[in-house]
C-alpha cells in the first residue's frame, strides 16, 4: 500500500516535540479563552467539557495506532506514548477542574463519586489510567518486560468507561457521546483476532 | 398567600437580573441542537410571524387565536424571576409578559378541566435538532390547572422590554418560576385544557428522572446529580455554588398548592 508507506514515512519525519506542542496547545488557548470571555457566559462548563472531550479524543487516537498498523499498514507507533500521556493529561485536568471549580468541596466530590454512576464510571477510568501514566518511561518498560504489555491493556477498560461516562451524563438521546463510545468499541473490536473468520 | 399581584410581580427582593447576553447565548432549546450555543446560532430560522395559538379542549371558546389579538387584550408587565434549570444552573430574568390565567379566561375554562397541556412549534426544516430523536417531537408540557392559574405563572413575550429572541422561545412562552426550566415550554402553538394529566416531553423520555411536577426542590436530587446547589450563570469560573431554594425561592407563594403531597413521590 503506497499511501500507507507514504504516511508512515512522513510520520517518521515529524519530531516528537511537535506532537507534544500541538497536543498541549489547547491548554494555554483554553486558559486565554476562559479569561477573555471566549468560552461564553458559563465558561466553567465549557472548560470542563472541552478538557473531557480532548481526553477522550486523544485516548481514541492512541487506541487507533495498533489497528492502523495491523490493518492498514500505517505505522504511527512512535507517537503512541505521547498520545496516551496527552490523553491522561487532559483527563487529569478535566478531573481537577471538576473538583476545584465545579463541585468545590471534597465532601461533595466524594458523595458524587459514590452516588452518581456517571461520576463513578469516570473516576474509575481515571484510576485505571494512573498506573499507565506512572509506567510510561523507558525504564519502566524495560523493568516490567512482558508485564508492561499486560498492564497497559488497562487502557481498553479505561477507554470504555470514559466513553460510557460521556453517554451517561447526556440528557436525552444525543449523538456525540454515542459516536465516541462507538469509536472506542470499534477500535477495541479491531484488535480482536477472529478465530472463526480465519478458519473460514 | 399573596399580598397582592403587584408585589408578587417583583418576586423575592434583591434579585439582580443577568445581562441580555447571559440570558440569550446559553440556552436549552433542543429543537435547534443540544449545545447551549446552538439555539442562538440556529433559532433565527424559526418563522415567528404570523403566529397563532390554538386553544382547545375543555374551553368555552376554542379556536386559533392570533398573537396580535391575544396581545391587544393582555396587559404586559415586567416580572423579575429566578430561573433554575434542572441541570443545576440558574439565572435571573426580567421577563415581560402577562398572566396565563388572563389568557385562559379569554378562552373560558370549562368546569371539567383539571390540567393544561402545551405544545411547542415544530417545523423540521427550520429546526436542525429535530433530525435526531433526542426527544419525541413536538415538545409538550403540562401543568395542573391551579398551577396554570397561579398569578406567578406567566406567558412571556419579552426580556428587558425587547421582543423575546427566538432562542428564548419567541414569540410566546410559558414561565413557571418555581419549577425547573424545562417546564417553561417555549414557542407555544397550542394550549389544551384536559381532564387528565397530559404527557410531558422529558417525562416521556425518562420518567425516572423527570416527573410531571418538577418543582425546584433542593432535597430531591436528580438521579444523576445533586439539586442542593446551583451555579449562577455569569458569576465566573471561580464563583462558589449557591444553595438552591425550595420552590426556587417562591415557597411562600406556591407551597400551598402542594399541601399534603409527598414531594419525593411527586417529583
Image (cartoon, rainbow, N blue to C red):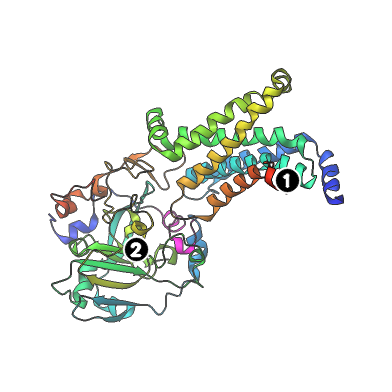
Image quadrant in which you'd find residue A69: top right
- The label number, if any, that marks residue A199 in the structure image: 1
Of A81 and B34, the residue lying toward us: A81
- Image spot of residue B124 (x, y percent): 48, 71
Disc 2 vs disc 1: Cβ atoms closer than 8 Å? no
Chain for disc number 2:
B
Chain for disc number 1:
A
Question: Over which residues does the magenta segment extend?
Answer: B18-34
- The local crowd at label 2, few if under 14, some if 14 to 19, many if 20 or more residues have their Cα within 10 Å, is many
Please name which of the two marks, 2 or 1, marks the residue nearer to the observer. 1
Report if residue B179 is visible in the image. yes
Local SS, label 1? helix
Tell me if residue B137 comes above or below residue A184 in the rendering: below
Position of the N terminus of chain B, as image quadrant, is bottom left
- The label number, if any, that marks residue B185 in the structure image: 2
- Image spot of residue B194 (x, y percent): 22, 70
Left/right of residue B153 with respect to residue A42 in the rendered view: left
Amino acid at each position: 500500500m503506497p499511501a500507507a508507506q507514504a504516511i508512515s514515512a512522513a510520520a517518521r519525519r515529524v519530531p516528537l516535540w511537535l506532537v507534544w506542542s500541538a497536543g498541549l496547545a489547547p491548554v494555554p488557548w483554553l486558559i486565554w479563552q476562559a479569561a477573555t470571555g471566549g468560552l461564553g457566559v458559563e465558561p466553567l462548563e465549557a472548560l470542563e467539557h472541552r478538557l473531557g472531550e480532548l481526553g477522550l479524543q486523544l485516548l481514541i487516537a492512541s487506541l487507533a495506532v495498533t489497528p492502523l498498523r495491523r490493518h492498514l499498514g500505517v505505522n504511527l507507533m512512535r507517537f503512541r506514548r505521547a498520545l496516551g500521556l496527552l490523553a491522561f493529561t487532559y483527563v487529569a485536568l478535566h478531573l481537577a477542574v471538576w473538583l476545584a471549580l465545579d463541585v468545590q468541596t471534597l465532601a461533595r466530590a466524594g458523595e458524587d463519586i459514590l452516588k452518581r454512576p456517571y461520576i463513578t464510571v469516570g473516576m474509575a477510568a481515571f484510576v485505571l489510567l494512573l498506573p499507565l501514566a506512572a509506567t510510561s518511561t523507558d525504564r519502566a518498560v524495560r523493568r516490567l518486560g512482558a508485564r508492561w504489555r499486560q498492564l497497559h491493556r488497562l487502557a481498553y477498560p479505561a477507554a470504555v468507561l470514559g466513553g460510557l461516562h460521556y453517554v451517561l451524563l447526556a440528557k436525552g438521546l444525543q449523538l456525540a457521546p454515542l459516536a465516541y463510545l462507538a469509536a472506542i468499541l470499534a477500535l477495541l473490536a479491531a484488535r480482536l483476532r477472529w478465530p472463526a473468520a480465519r478458519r473460514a | 398567600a399573596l399580598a397582592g399581584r403587584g408585589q408578587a410581580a417583583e418576586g423575592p427582593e434583591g434579585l439582580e437580573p443577568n445581562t441580555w447576553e447571559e440570558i440569550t447565548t446559553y440556552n436549552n432549546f433542543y429543537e435547534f441542537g443540544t449545545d447551549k450555543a446552538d439555539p442562538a446560532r440556529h433559532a433565527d430560522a424559526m418563522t415567528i410571524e404570523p403566529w397563532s395559538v390554538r386553544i382547545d379542549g375543555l374551553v368555552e371558546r376554542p379556536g386559533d387565536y392570533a398573537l396580535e389579538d391575544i396581545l391587544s387584550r393582555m396587559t404586559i408587565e415586567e416580572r423579575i424571576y429566578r430561573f433554575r434549570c434542572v441541570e443545576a444552573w440558574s439565572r435571573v430574568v426580567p421577563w415581560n409578559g402577562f398572566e396565563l390565567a388572563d389568557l385562559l379566561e379569554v378562552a373560558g375554562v370549562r368546569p371539567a378541566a383539571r390540567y393544561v397541556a402545551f405544545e411547542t412549534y415544530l417545523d423540521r426544516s427550520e429546526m436542525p435538532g429535530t433530525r435526531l430523536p433526542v426527544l419525541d417531537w413536538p415538545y409538550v408540557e403540562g401543568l395542573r390547572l391551579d398551577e396554570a392559574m397561579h398569578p406567578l405563572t406567566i406567558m412571556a413575550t419579552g426580556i428587558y422590554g425587547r421582543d423575546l429572541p427566538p432562542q428564548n422561545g419567541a414569540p410566546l412562552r410559558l414561565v413557571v418560576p418555581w419549577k425547573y426550566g424545562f417546564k417553561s415550554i417555549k414557542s407555544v402553538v397550542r394550549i389544551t385544557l384536559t381532564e387528565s394529566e397530559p404527557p410531558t416531553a422529558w417525562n416521556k423520555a425518562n420518567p425516572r428522572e423527570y416527573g410531571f411536577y418538577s418543582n425546584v426542590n433542593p432535597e430531591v436530587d436528580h438521579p444523576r446529580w445533586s439539586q442542593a446547589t446551583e451555579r449562577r450563570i455569569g458569576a465566573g469560573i471561580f464563583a462558589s455554588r449557591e444553595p438552591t431554594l425550595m420552590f426556587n425561592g417562591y415557597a411562600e407563594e406556591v407551597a400551598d398548592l402542594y399541601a399534603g403531597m409527598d414531594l419525593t413521590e411527586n417529583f
